């Protein structure tokens, strides 16, 4: 008897759909079979790169070389990870094909055809090759990561050693020896660099390339100077013409000043690079120098741009910082001077790095950079303080420093003094490190300041009810002013948190001259997708999906709630309480489902949250037991409905109308329009009087005290007539009068009638009392006054005391 698998194979053969032989699969139809050799080739290339990196690490002598090798290991690890990820679909496809074929037939069963056996063997071989390739890629990636960690350890050890190394004071002859008596090796290396630069320069000025070189250089100069000038003027006109009045124009122009300065400088540097590389490729040494010089130029442009944006000399009224005009004018040359010094001496460092200069030459370059920049940093706060003191002596108004400005002023002053003192006592490496750290911290803080102001002003302008964007949002989405304000607050908070995260990462993981925005973003992504978050499967893509899912879900929930409460339920259910309960129940269930869906979109696996649930179990048992109890009680109130919205209830001596039943508590509106919040558990566990449940009627009872001399029948008729004539008193049950009590104080008669609702009792009782008193006076029937009642009670009490004493 044929098995199902054999029947399926027979049908494939019958309709001409038999599996292709191995040669055709490997050569034509199955791209997976081709991927195994490709993976092997890629792994060989990766292994060659890894061996080359290991050789370079053993020969590396500078931190720049180690830094580049560390970056290369990161790129190699990323490539290996991508290779392993790309091979996974091929593995799954091969496994699926093997599952279709099924296991090999057992002994004694019908044998397979030769084509099926050949196909299974081919698939098994291909899968084995892919499995080996994936395993080898993962092992190689682990080795690359270990090598990167070793390089990082080597850099840290070398860095600590350099910082603690005392190489002699800058005032000593040893420091100036590379200039007075340069070594032969340094001279030879510099000559090689000079020759390489001259060859590139001469090649670019050959007759057939001369005019192109001249045109590109002129274009670079024009873009860097006139292009920056006209771009800023045009964007200033745009801000005045199209942006709303307020702080947005000032923060926008500050961002424009910085951005245009950096962009035009970057374009000019790229044109400069194209000018000297279009003839022939640069040698490896000059290529490294060009890359470092380009990055250094961008950072120096950032220094100049931030300084110009802070001082805002062309538009003092648009200045964001609290800075006097005289102080700003006095500091106008410091930012370009600092940028120029950083560029000039940073270039010297780049040359020392690419030519592998001697230790003495490197120390000389580092000391020169630290000394000149340190003196500029020291002169800046001293100059500002001197101008402020002069203004105060002249009696002019001086802007008060903010706390942050004071901290920056003091930090720059102290940092520059430490730099100069370190140079004097011989710790040149430490002084150079501290110099670039001071510049980097200042750049990061200033950039964060401008970005923060721009983000706050932009959110406020977009969602302002007076701007065109705010009016469009109100008209398109039927938003109210408070909705726009809420959106502005939320987006401003998100922008502030994002910028704060970027600033923290930049301060702790960035350095001057090497860190780029892309590297900062990569670091943030690495933090968000670190091992701690990987266990929860939280990645930036999942975060975006979760935010989108949450926003859409909240919008759908609100639209559905409005549709239920205003359209569907009013046309199907007349009871207001039932409608409110259904809407509340739908909201509770819907938001719980929305939270679950959002967590699923976030990629959180519930198995990874078991430790969180275990940790919270004690808190749920003790600290959250009241919340859980009130939540369950709220669900009972919404389902059993002993109390519903609109009921008039009494609990704990307080009576009012139920306005809303929430998840945790119920809102009861009292007669004075105040609201009492009652936990749901009390409505379940305590005695509650529901005055309106079951179409209850209101009872209006009035008790009156009369003297014993009155005619009870006459008074009874008067009271009944007053009740019967009032239209709110129902005929059924009919009103009645009871003889409540006969005592020394008089006769107490109580009259009772029924109204349609308990809420009518108070107003009806008041109107009836007015009418009864009017009828009694018309019939000349008097009532016992309170003084008479009290007097008669006192007489009775005295009589009782006398009887007790006599007995």
Image (tube, rainbow, N blue to C red):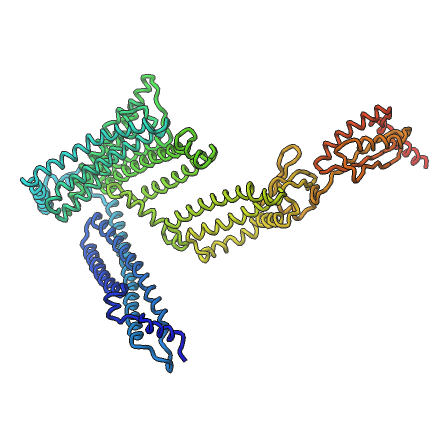
Q: Nearer the viewer, residue 651 or 698?
A: 698
Q: Is residue 183 visible?
A: no
**Left or right: where 769 falls relative to 246:** right
Q: Is residue 564 toward the left or the right of residue 489 in the image?
A: right
Residue at figure coordinates x 92%, y 35% from the top left: 805
Q: Is residue 418 left or right of residue 676?
A: left
Residue 785 visible in the shown view = yes
Vertical side of 50 occupied by 410: above or below = above
Tell me: residue 406, above or below residue 549.
above
Q: Position of residue 587 (x, y in %)?
A: 54, 46
Q: How many numbered marks appear?
A: 0
Given residues 182 and 133, the one toward you in this image is 133
State the residue lying farthest toward the right.
806
| Quadrant, the C terminus | top right
Residue 678 percent location from the top left of the image = 62, 42
Query: Can you tell which quarter of the image residue 11 is in?
Result: bottom left
Report which quarter residue 199 is drawn in.
top left
């Amino acid at each position: 008897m044929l098995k199902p698998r054999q029947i399926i194979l027979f049908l494939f053969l019958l309709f001409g759909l038999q599996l292709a032989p191995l040669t055709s699969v490997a050569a034509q139809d199955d791209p997976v079979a081709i991927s195994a050799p490709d993976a092997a080739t890629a792994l060989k290339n990766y292994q060659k790169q890894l061996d080359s990196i290991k050789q370079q690490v053993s020969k590396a002598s500078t931190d720049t070389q180690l830094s580049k090798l560390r970056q290369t290991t990161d790129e190699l690890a990323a490539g290996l990870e991508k290779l392993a990820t790309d091979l996974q679909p091929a593995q799954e496809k091969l496994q699926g094909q093997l599952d279709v074929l099924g296991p090999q037939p057992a002994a004694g069963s019908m044998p397979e055809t030769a084509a099926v056996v050949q196909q299974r063997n081919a698939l098994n071989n291909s899968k084995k090759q892919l499995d080996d390739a994936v395993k080898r890629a993962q092992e190689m990636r682990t080795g690359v990561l270990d090598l990167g960690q070793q390089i990082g350890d080597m850099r840290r050890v070398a860095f600590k050693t350099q910082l603690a190394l005392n190489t002699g004071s800058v005032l000593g002859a040893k420091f100036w020896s590379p200039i007075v008596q340069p070594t032969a090796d340094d001279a030879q290396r510099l000559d090689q660099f000079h020759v390489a630069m001259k060859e590139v320069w001469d090649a670019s000025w050959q007759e057939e390339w001369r005019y192109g070189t001249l045109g590109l250089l002129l274009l670079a100069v024009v873009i860097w100077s006139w292009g920056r000038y006209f771009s800023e003027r045009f964007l200033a006109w745009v801000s005045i013409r199209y942006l709303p009045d307020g702080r947005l124009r000032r923060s926008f122009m500050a961002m424009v000043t910085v951005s245009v300065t950096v962009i035009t400088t970057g374009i000019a540097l790229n044109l400069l690079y194209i000018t000297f590389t279009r003839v022939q490729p640069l040698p490896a040494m000059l290529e490294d120098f060009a890359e470092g010089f380009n990055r250094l130029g961008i950072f120096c442009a950032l220094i100049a741009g931030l300084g110009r944006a802070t001082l805002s000399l062309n538009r003092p009224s648009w200045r964001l910082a609290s800075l006097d005009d005289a102080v700003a004018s006095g500091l106008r040359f410091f930012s370009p001077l600092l940028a120029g010094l950083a560029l000039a001496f940073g270039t010297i460092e780049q040359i020392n790095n690419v030519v592998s200069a001697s230790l003495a030459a490197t120390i000389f370059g580092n000391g020169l950079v630290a000394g000149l920049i340190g003196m500029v940093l020291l002169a800046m706060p001293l100059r500002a303080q001197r101008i402020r003191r002069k203004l105060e002596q002249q009696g002019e108004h001086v802007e008060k420093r903010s706390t942050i400005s004071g901290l920056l002023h003091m930090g720059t002053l102290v940092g520059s003094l430490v730099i100069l003192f370190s140079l004097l006592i011989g710790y040149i490496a430490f002084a150079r490190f501290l110099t670039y750290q001071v510049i980097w911290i200042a750049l990061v803080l200033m950039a964060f300041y401008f970005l923060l102001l721009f983000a706050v002003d932009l959110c406020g302008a977009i969602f302002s009810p007076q701007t065109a964007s705010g009016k469009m949002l109100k008209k398109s989405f039927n938003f109210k002013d408070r909705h726009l304000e809420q959106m502005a607050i939320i987006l401003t908070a998100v922008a502030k948190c994002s910028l704060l995260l970027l600033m923290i990462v930049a301060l702790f993981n960035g350095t001057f001259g090497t860190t780029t925005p892309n590297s900062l973003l990569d670091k943030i992504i690495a933090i968000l997708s670190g091992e701690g978050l990987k266990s929860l499967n939280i990645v930036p893509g999942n975060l975006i999906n979760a935010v989108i899912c949450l926003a859409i879900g909240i919008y759908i929930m609100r639209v559905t709630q409005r549709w239920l409460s205003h359209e569907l339920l009013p046309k199907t259910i007349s009871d207001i309480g039932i409608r409110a309960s259904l809407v509340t129940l739908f909201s509770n269930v819907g938001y719980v489902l929305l939270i679950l869906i959002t967590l699923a979109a976030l990629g959180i696996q519930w198995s990874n949250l078991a430790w969180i649930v275990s940790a919270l179990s004690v808190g749920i048992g003790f600290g959250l037991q009241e919340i859980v109890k009130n939540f369950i009680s709220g669900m009972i109130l919404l389902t059993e409905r002993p109390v519903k919205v609109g009921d008039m209830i009494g609990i704990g001596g307080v009576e009012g109308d139920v306005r809303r039943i929430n998840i945790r508590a119920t809102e009861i509106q009292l007669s004075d329009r105040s609201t009492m919040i009652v936990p749901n558990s009390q409505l379940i566990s305590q005695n509650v009087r529901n005055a309106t449940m079951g179409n209850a009627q209101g009872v209006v009872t009035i008790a009156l005290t009369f003297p014993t001399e009155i005619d009870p029948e006459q008074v009874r008729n008067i009271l009944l007539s007053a009740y019967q004539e009032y239209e709110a008193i129902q005929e059924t049950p009919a009103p009645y009068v009871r003889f409540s009590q006969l005592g020394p104080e008089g006769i107490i008669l109580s009259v009772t009638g029924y109204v349609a609702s308990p809420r009518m009792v108070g107003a009806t009782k008041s109107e009836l009392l007015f009418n009864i008193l009017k009828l009694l006076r018309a019939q000349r029937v008097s009532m016992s006054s309170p003084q008479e009642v009290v007097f008669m009670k006192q007489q009775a009490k005295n009589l009782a005391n006398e009887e007790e004493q006599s007995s």
